[in-house]
Image (cartoon, rainbow, N blue to C red):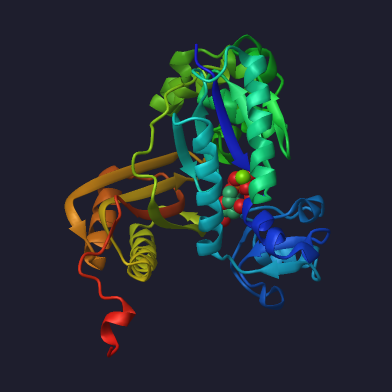
Amino acid sequence: MKIIMLVDMDYFFAACEELRHPEYREMPLVVGADPKGGTARGVVSTCNYVARKLGIHSAMPISMAYRLKKDAIFLPVDYPYYESMSSKVMELVKSFSKRFEQVSIDEAFVDVTDKVDNFEQAVEYAKALKEDIKNKIGLPCSIGISSSRLMAKMACEAGKPDGVRLIKGEDAARFLSPLPVEKLYGIGKKTAEKLESMGFKTVGQLAKANTVSLVSNFGVFGAELYRSANGQGDDGIIENYEIKSIGRERTFESDTTDRGRIVAQIKSIADEVYEEAKKQGVSFKTVTVKIRYHDFSEHLRSRNIGHYSEELAEISENAVQLFDMHAEKDERVRKIGVRVSGLEKRKGQKKMKDFTAP
Ligand code: TTP
Ligand code: MG
């Protein structure tokens, strides 16, 4: 049996802002679109816990956040800064175990099976990592520990904020059983509503469901739902060999199946990624598309383009093709992301000083 940890930063973008603006620490702090006096259409990226107490949360229309607290601190999203903080965090996490898989800007799975003898030691190990992140970088996180990715994620959510939480494999079913179905990782609002209408209100009820009926209602996802409800999940960690990447993602203001809208968004994100790669003076070998559906299930698809490229068209065309090949038709898309990795400093790149006369 493996020992898997999930490290997830607490209120990440807002915590990064608090770090460089300690004066906002006790105030409601919202990172996201400019509310423009309550008339804007953008959304909240995230907010600190002071703002969460007022009912503000990620993905909420920024106009609603503004209505809830007009004099909150509203800050724009500064990806380059959060990415630089993320890199520091990930380097530190990696130093605790090379069996490491970054799954988002602020989350990573770590397999510590070889590092500790048992779950109790894993808790101490996680506390040491948490302290290190706090002391060396200044950011809070939570860590969940279990024997599968799913349960590590559930443990982490239960430990938030600023906590370390262990759920042993044998306790998984007991932990999950009383939870409402929408609390199970991977179940979005729509799936939860459908499950409830089928009579499954709690995860415990779902764990006893007839798999045939789940599969006939949800397809392959039904079998996964059943496994998840029973606390079963993968424990594999895909080690990132190409950790360095440049990526951007965006959440649609309303979930969409409109290919035209999605493709336009992919092209616009590809443009931003291209500009950032140009700024950093790197070429890339791999293009990845991330599709997050309305129920928060996520698909990552990558293509190795076989050579180092610096072309915008290579990013956008590959990204659109990956989307067309792999997107689940008729599933509403919530968020789309584009990333380039396998980075290398551009060859023959002239430095500024090369242009100035000696
Ligand atoms: P999360 O880890 O989901 O959220 P969080 O770190 O803000 O809060 P928590 O303490 O609950 O973990 O997401 C990481 C970052 O991703 C978050 O800080 C901002 C960004 N994000 C969005 O831009 N839009 C979203 O809808 C969500 C959920 C996150
Ligand atoms: Mg987080």
Q: Locate residue 343 relative to residue 191 in the image: left or right.
A: left
Question: Can residue 318 be seen from the camera position used here?
Answer: yes
Among all residues in the image, which is located at the extreme front? 358
In this figure, what is the number of numbered marks? Answer: 0
Residue 46 seen: no
Q: Position of residue 164 (x, y in %)?
A: 70, 30
**Along the viewing direction, whichever of 143 and 214 lies nearer the viewer:** 143
Q: Is residue 228 above or below residue 31?
A: above
Q: Residue furthest left?
A: 306
Residue at 38% across, 52% down: 245
> In this picture, is 323 found above or below 220?
below
Which one is in front, 206 or 47?
47
Instruction: Identify the image quadrant of residue 198.
Output: top right
In which quadrant of the rendered image does the C terminus lie? Answer: bottom left
Pick the front one: 140 or 149: 140
306 left or right, relative to 59: left
Give residue 38's quadrant in the image: bottom right
- Can you give x and y, in whole percent of width and height, for residue 234 in the image? 45, 22
Q: What residue is drawn where x is 66% and y is 37%?
A: 130
| Left or right: where 110 falls relative to 134 | left
- Vertical side of 352 occupied by 180: above or below: above
Residue 91 spot, x, y in % from top left: 50, 44
Residue 137 at x, y = what percent? 64, 50
Please tell me which residue is depicted at 41% across the width and 44% down the height of the picture: 331
Q: Hey, which quadrant is residue 195 in on the image? A: top right
39 shown above or below 293? below
In the image, 51 versus 243, the foreground residue is 243
